[in-house]
Amino acid sequence: MFQKERAHRIPGGKPTPGRPPRAILIKLLLSTDRDMILRRARECSPIDHQGVKLSFFPDFARQTQEKRRSFIEIKKRLASKDIKYSLQYPAKLRVIYNGTSQFFEKPQQVLDWMEQLGI
């Protein structure tokens, strides 16, 4: 059983039909519980509850969210070329190519690296 410190909905009115439900923020006492929930959610994805798709995300600071969001187009490009990658905390992209890992803190660094290799 998980021990939560608090849980609440994001402010806002009830969503109209066809719109996703409001987000719920849950603060757990143990980070290991949070990590386990996020891991299980990824393993069981997609999760459907009464016809509604549920998504689970860690709650990052706005600045961290923006840095992570800056890699979206790069991740799409890497996926289209079947290049493995992962986004490390807080916002560092790890690219695995030809058995080696490269780490990038900015999207332009990845583009320059890809251009240099002719990818």
Image: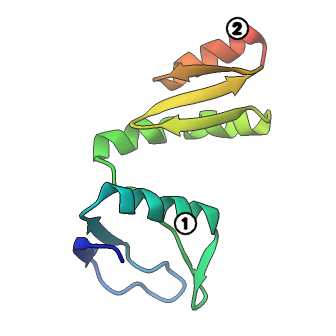
Q: Which quadrant holds the N terminus?
A: bottom left
Residue lying farthest front?
A: 1
- Counting every numbered tag in the picture gives 2
Q: Is residue 74 above or below residue 113?
A: below
Residue picked out by circle 1: 41
Q: Is residue 41 above or below residue 70?
A: below
How was the colour assigned to the protein in this rendering?
A: rainbow
**Is 111 in front, or is 58?**
58
Q: Which quadrant holds the C terminus?
A: top right
Q: For the point 68% across and 26% down, which residue is it?
A: 96
Q: For the point 54% across and 84% down, which residue is it?
A: 18
Q: Quadrant of residue 77?
A: top right
Q: CA distance from mark 1 to mark 2?
A: 37 Å
Q: Is residue 86 above or below residue 109?
A: below
Residue picked out by circle 2: 116
Q: Is residue 118 left or right of residue 2?
A: right
Name which of mark 1 and mark 2 comes first in the sequence. 1
Q: Is residue 116 left or right of residue 22?
A: right
Residue lying farthest left?
A: 5
Q: Secondary structure at mark 1?
A: helix
Q: Amino acid at mark 1?
A: Ala
Q: Is residue 96 above or below residue 32?
A: above
Looking at the image, do the residues carrying marks 1 and 2 touch, with CB atoms under 8 Å apart?
Answer: no
**For mark 1, does the 10 Å Cα neighbourhood hold few (<14), some (14 to 19), or many (20 or more) residues?**
some
